[in-house]
Image: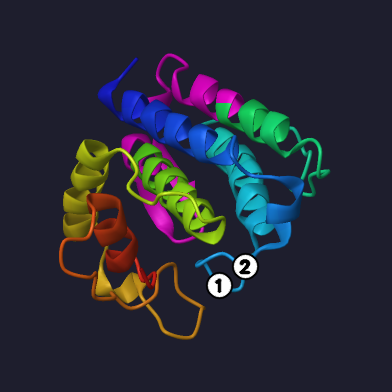
């Protein structure tokens, strides 16, 4: 397993832990990732799994992101496992992948998947009243990486960009809260 996929697996573990504390009633709560509700965030990661798999040459399942209220944990687990397996295929990370916004090394795509999964764990934790102080050391690493890899052109206030404008995290905020604020979330 590469360092990149080990980081992705760590983000999956964080998301899995947060998701395990989500009730069916929580699925309709608003997330900090507007306009999505918790169920939309989970669905995004499930559909995103197919996107990542096909980007490195794997086969999509075509299952879509509409998840039954009693199946969201299993659906996420399946998507995460498929994605991790695709990233771990021999030669998968040696590729250059074609994405809607350009080409990039597959290892950079794994970095996107990692930050996306971890940040959405934060979104769900915040929406459902869980602690947002998630894996402090790892969140700090992701924050430093995000500061050097996310261009201002990826930000927008109208919801059309990948990230919102950077927000100010409160004094003494956890690394996960600082990462969320850097990515445009109100903490």
- Specify the color scheme: rainbow
- Front residue of 104/25: it is 25
Q: Identify the magenta region.
A: 81-109
Residue 51 pos. (x, y %): 59, 43
In front: label 1 or label 2: 2
In this rendering, the answer to whether 169 lies above or below 44 is below
Circles 1, 2 touching at the beta carbon (< 8 Å)? yes
How many callouts does the rendering have? Answer: 2
User: Can residue 61 be seen in the rendering of this structure?
Assistant: yes
Whole-angstrom CA distance, mark 1 to mark 2, is 8 Å
Task: Tell me the quadrant of the picture where the C terminus can be found.
Answer: bottom left
Name the residue beneath numbered marker 1: 34
Residue 137, image x, y percentages = 20, 38
Looking at the image, which is closer to me, 88 or 41? 41
Residue placed farthest to the bottom in the image? 158
Residue indicated by mark 2 = 30
Note whether 30 is above or below 112 in the view shown: below
Please give the name of the residue rendered at 38% of the width and 73% of the height, measured from the top-left corner.
186
Q: Secondary structure at mark 1?
A: loop
Q: Is residue 120 left or right of residue 6?
A: right
Residue 92 covered by magenta stretch: yes
Residue 46 % position (x, y) = 65, 42
Mark 2: few/some/many CA within 10 Å (<14, 14-19, 20+): many
* Magenta stretch encompasses residue 54: no
Q: Residues within 10 Å of mark 1 (few under 14, many from 20)?
A: few
């Amino acid at each position: 397993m590469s360092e990149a996929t080990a980081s992705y697996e760590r983000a999956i573990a964080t998301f899995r832990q947060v998701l395990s504390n989500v009730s069916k009633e929580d699925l309709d709560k608003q997330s900090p990732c507007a306009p999505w509700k918790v169920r939309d965030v989970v669905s995004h990661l499930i559909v995103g799994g197919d996107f990542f798999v096909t980007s490195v040459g794997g086969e999509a399942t075509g299952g879509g992101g509409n998840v039954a209220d009693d199946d969201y944990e299993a659906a996420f687990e399946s998507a995460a496992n498929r994605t991790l397996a695709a990233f771990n295929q021999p030669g998968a990370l040696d590729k250059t992948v074609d994405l809607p916004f350009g080409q990039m090394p597959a290892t950079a795509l794994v970095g996107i998947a990692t930050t996306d999964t971890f940040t959405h764990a934060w979104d769900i934790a915040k929406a459902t009243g869980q602690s947002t102080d998630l894996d402090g050391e790892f969140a700090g690493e992701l924050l430093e990486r995000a500061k050097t890899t996310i261009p201002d052109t990826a930000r927008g206030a109208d919801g059309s960009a990948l990230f919102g404008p950077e927000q100010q995290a409160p004094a003494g905020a956890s690394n996960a809260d600082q990462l969320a604020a850097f990515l445009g979330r109100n903490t």
